[in-house]
Image: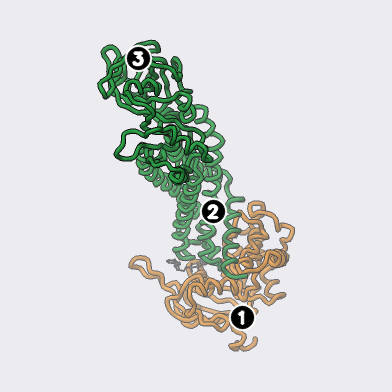
Amino acid sequence: MMGRDAQDTIIATRNLSRTYTIGKVQVQALKNVTLDIRRGEFAAIMGKSGSGKSTLLHQLGLLDTPTEGEIMIDGIEISGLSEAARTRFRLEKFGYVFQEYAILPELTALENVYLPAMALGLSQGECTRNGMDALEKVGLTERADHRPREMSGGEQQRVAIARALINKPKILFADEPTANLDSASSKQILELFRGLNRDLGQTILMVTHELEDADIVDQVIWLADGEVVGREG
Amino acid sequence: MTSTTTELKVSAFLAYKFIAKGNRGTSALTILIMALAFVNLMFTTSVFDGMGDATEKQVIDTLYSNIVIEPKDEEIYIENPDSVVKKIINVPGVIGTSAQYVTGATIAYEEQSGAWSIRAVDPADERTVSTVPDMMIEGEYLSRSDTREIIIGKEIAGGHGGSLEHTSLGGVVVGDTVEVAFTNGVRREYRVKGIFDTNFIQSNQLAYVTEKELESVLGIHDMASQILVKTDTKGEEDRFPNQFVELGVHEDIKPWIVYAGIVATLTQSFDALNALTGAIGFFVAGVTIFIVIYVSTVSKRRQMGILRAIGIKESIIVRSYIFQAVFYAVCGCIAGLVIMFAILVPYFIKHPMVFPMGNVTLLIEQKAAITRSAGLIISAAIAGFLPSWRAVRETILDAIWGD
Ligand SMILES: Nc1ncnc2c1ncn2[C@@H]1O[C@H](COP(=O)(O)OP(=O)(O)O)[C@@H](O)[C@H]1O
Ligand SMILES: [Mg+2]
């Protein structure tokens, strides 16, 4: 195991806490989370349901704002960013895969995939080229012109992954990406992630509660009641 | 590419896809409702414009022609009207003149009587400025040499279903004799030679005798109370008075509009009504679009949250909804115009509405169509903005996972 020097670190948090307030009740979803993730690492966040996995992913993925603590991503202190800068940051540097496929039913697979590239200002030609490249990475080039309703759940999830890859993100976030899939499709998705990580050096941070997933990742961050209770790898 | 162009492009792309690949039924229904809203906005205006137009036409055709030359302030008559007519008859655009006397009189038939205005004309000249000679419903128009013969409007005659039946002579027919008492005390009996109906309540209250006849009643010659001048285009009357003055006409020269107080009054009350129906129409159209976009933002709430999560700016999303709303409004306006021109206008040409100013058909003024369309599109844009703007106010996490 190599030393974790600062150069290699893409995500680092210090004493990260997130407290939800519902009426007078306060739920501490994250407590003092300090961790780091290296560039090129495939990391999994694991723990029981309600342990704070999604909450952690949302803080790191800039979809939510922590109550306390610091997040450094790619050397940038996140708390200093405006809302517009955070949106831009997500578009340029992050890719997301959610539990549900979350692609637009009105768009074809290819259009869904290149939408974030279009928003970056790429030309139609570049959008199509990059979109086809991304679809190739997930093995769906022949489905490019299909609409989501003509595709299986596994295929739709792969379209979502291709969309997440289109802008060559520094980090790919995935929150239980296989939870709604049958075991064959789940396996395919995990192998896809493994391959993206191994072959392209893609940094991936994935929430999962499948214990067997632990075997294929570089690092597992174990959460319980909002606290990091263990790190493996 | 600048970021604004990029944003507009993405907004337009999303809007296009949502419309083209979304629910066709919803789109069609929305456009239909917008079209009906547009027709609703245009219809009252077109009726009012049609009424105004019909009134103007009636005032010109059956009352005052395009220009009226009147005696100067202190005088009762224009002396030697022929010399005035000679001065102007060759002005380009002048296509007819009719010098005439106008006098008040009481006309009586059996127990009925009433006060009306009588015009005394040269029938041949009158035909060049007025359509009344073509509007005879009984009998015939005057001839130059007629004496003791009178032409009366249907509101004087009565018995023809006029609006002023109660003040009419109660059903005079051609060949009946009426007694006319002039303001100078002269009373004469006249044979009713014809009855006319212009469809216009104002001109239907006139009576006509020949110039020759009235000169013998009044004991004067070569005078006129007014000279009506017909020009070849409507709306350009203002260019004539100066020319007439330069040619040596010293009398008062007024375009018809000065006499058409009734038109101005009508137009004013229409404008108020129009503003009211317009406001309601825009509101209805706005609310319709608002509901359509609102439902769409509710059903796409998660998707919009995801789009925001992956870095699509809120302004892009909001604008895509504004584009959709504007698209629906533009289609609605076009469909509405098609409905107006293809169905309603032809229908009312076939079945005109009967009003006191005559038969009214729809008049679609370009200005009205443009302002109504613009108003509709603006209300649609606002109605598209509000729900989508509200939708992107909530946090991304609430949008994706909230309930
Ligand atoms: N928006 C929220 N409001 C209130 N409580 C929340 C919210 N999101 C998560 N929580 C609570 O925070 C804790 C962690 O939730 P979550 O991160 O979703 O867990 P996991 O993803 O591990 O199942 C849970 O107790 C959950 O009820
Ligand atoms: Mg979760």
Q: Quadrant of the C terminus of chain B?
A: bottom left
Q: Which residue is mark 2?
A: B324
Q: Is residue A34 left or right of residue B262?
A: right
Horizontal and vertical percent position of residue A233: 61, 80
Query: From this viewpoint, which residue is outermost toward the right?
Result: A142
Count residues near mark 2 (Cα–Cα under 10 Å), then give few for <14, some for 14-19, many for 20+: many
Q: Which residue is mark 1?
A: A233
Mark closer to the observer (2, 3): 3
- Which tint is chain A? orange
Subunit ID for the residue under disc 2 = B
- Which tint is chain B? green
Subunit ID for the residue under disc 1 = A
Dot placed on the residue nearer the N-terminal end, 2 or 3: 3
Q: Which residue is mark 3?
A: B190
Q: Amino acid at mark 3?
A: Tyr
Q: CA distance from mark 1 to mark 2?
A: 51 Å
Q: Nearer the viewer, residue B236 or A71?
A: B236
Which residue shows up at 45% across the image and 18% down it?
B143
Give the SS element for disc 2.
helix
Horizontal and vertical percent position of residue B96: 49, 33
Q: CA distance from mark 2 to mark 3?
A: 72 Å
